[in-house]
Image (cartoon, rainbow, N blue to C red):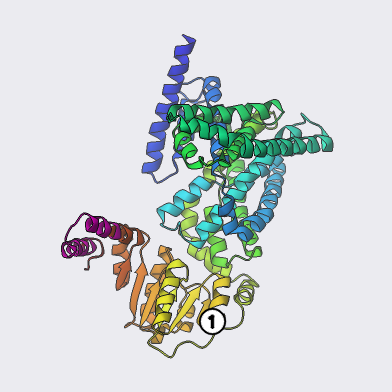
Amino acid sequence: MEDVRLIVDIVIALGAAAIGGLVAQRLGLPALIGYILAGLAIGPNTPGLVADVDRVQLLANLGVALLMFGLGVEFSLSEVLRVRRAALLGGAIQIPLMILLGTAAGLAGGWTLGAALLLGGAFAISSSIVALKTLLGRGEMESPQARVALGLGIVQDFSLAPMLALVPVIAGERGGAFGIAQSLLISAGVLIAAFVLGTRFVPPLLRIVARSGSRELFMLVIVAIALGVALATHAAGLSLGLGAFLAGIVVSESDFEEQVLADIIPIRDIFATLFFVAVGMLIDPALLLAQWPLVLGLAFVLVAGKLLITGGALLAAGVDHRTATLAAVFMAQMGEFSFVLASAGLEHGLIEITEYGTILSVALCSILAMPLLVAISPRLVSIAERLPGVARQERLAAGPPPPPAPAGGHVVICGFGRVGAEIGAALDRWHQPYSVIELNPAIVRDLRARGIEALYGDAATRVELETAGVPTARTVAVTTPDLLVTEAVIRNARALNPAIHVIVRAPGTGDVRGLTAEGADEIVQPEFEAGLEFVRQVLGWQGIDAAETEELLDARRQTVYGTA
């Protein structure tokens, strides 16, 4: 009967998670909130259907291991290097300051020093999943704030490994400075061993398994590596999660990273769901209701602290005020890996179950605050722009003053990334005058060195558009994927020059109607246009008449854009 009871618990947990996740997504919330609330509903602290916490927790440990393994496999040094100054310097400032803030908040709330330090560690880590889901929903994945937030998120996630290594030390299982040094030396030794395994032994093994052509065998070997390395590090006194993370780094050294992720993600997601359900099962609503002032107070400190500290750290790292503020907004919550850290603290006796529940509740409050923060983000950007020294620092970063604006009839390009650079190259070929508004100081300096009027600033502001010559320009091209900026440019450009021709980029096809209503003359949706080009190429190779193909493409554009 015990075996059957385990199956019953799994069915209850997964069924509740499916319902909770579906309801959360219908409400526009992250699915993990639904999973945690589902665990609360089937936990021992609420009436109704109850699953066994210990049995679900046993399976949830696999979820932690597979989550950390996936993090190790996905760890992208190249993504960090793309925004290395913002991610590395910003992270080096933000993570310690958030740990200090969380520790101070915990001590003020009457927690022990060890518990407060764990709270500080949880404060330091944001939810990359929530941030990416929000960015995807807003069509901003190609924006500067997305790149900075992603890079900073990777650095934060990576910081979890040493935090997990130090949990037993802080809990008193290894004493004093010697214990800290011992843990760090063990972690370094295991990391070096993992690197040696990754470069010398694992890739040949995976190649041998891959040649067998058996996907099942390949998956078995991957899971065995993940759990085997996790158990080895656990035997060395480190956590299972840290070991699984190192196993992921081992596998990422092979040529099969993408295949590993494709095979492991379905299993990982199932067991990770059980982890979030188990997290919810440990929450006691009665205790939390009794501590609601503490929960709300800590949530406010967390969100406000992350906005100020993350934004300030990115500004100190040389990021412009708009990108820094928006990246801080998207990272202003506690993440899923904070739950992993809290679970490790509970396991080692560093925190009590009440404090564990408080950390989870603070995390939920911070995630629920995301829609409000996004809604007020334009106002936060405006506040950041007026901070002392920000405007001067950004002017200095942009280099010498720009050349004079073109006399008239020119093009104003808002955003000089890949799309804007293509427009500029075409205009250069035909010797057409143009000016540029850009937030990347390096790009601005390069353009000014070439004699092009390039302004460092936010294209959404009327003063920047006026300085760029919009009142006398013939065309304004808005290449940014940021919908709010695009709408502001349309309104301000029309106010400055009602006759100007406005060409904009739409983040998604669903944004076309709104941009047309704002006053855009031409709209380009990159993914839709890429799809049409694929259609043209495929039909051409299939021998379809070119004129008929163009007729089809025109009809599709008419449907999406409302114009041929």
Q: Residue at x 72, y 42 (%)?
A: 107
Question: Toward the viewer: 466 or 411?
Answer: 411
Report the residue that reaches farthest toward the top: 1
In the rendered image, residue 505, in percent from the top left (x then y), is placed at 37, 66
Q: Secondary structure at mark 1?
A: loop
* Secondary structure that dominates the magenta span: helix
Residue 215's image quarter?
top left
Queried whether the magenta region covers residue 536, the answer comes back as: yes
Quadrant where the image shows the C terminus: bottom left
Task: Decide if residue 524 is on the left or right side of residue 223.
Answer: left
In the rendered image, residue 165, in percent from the top left (x then y), is placed at 70, 36
In the rendered image, residue 453, in percent from the top left (x then y), is placed at 50, 82
Q: Residue at x 43, y 76 (%)?
A: 425
Task: Decide if residue 536 is on the left or right side of residue 390.
Answer: left
Tell me which amino acid carries mark 1. Arg
Q: Residue at x 53, y 22 (%)?
A: 53
Task: State which region is magenta.
Answer: 533-558
- Total of numbered circles in the picture? 1
Queried whether the magenta region covers residue 5, the answer comes back as: no
In the rendered image, residue 197, in percent from the top left (x then y), is placed at 64, 35
Q: Do we see residue 166 in this rendering?
A: no
Question: Toward the viewer: 230 or 139?
Answer: 230
Q: Is residue 68 above or below residue 526?
A: above
Q: Which residue is mark 1?
A: 450
Report the residue that reaches farthest toward the bottom: 407
Crowding near the residue tagged with mark 1, few <14, some 14–19, many ≥20 C-alpha atoms within 10 Å: few
Task: Decide if residue 205 is on the left or right side of residue 178.
Answer: left
Q: Do we see residue 105 in this rendering?
A: yes
Q: Is residue 403 above or below residue 488?
A: below
Question: Toward the viewer: 161 or 498?
Answer: 161
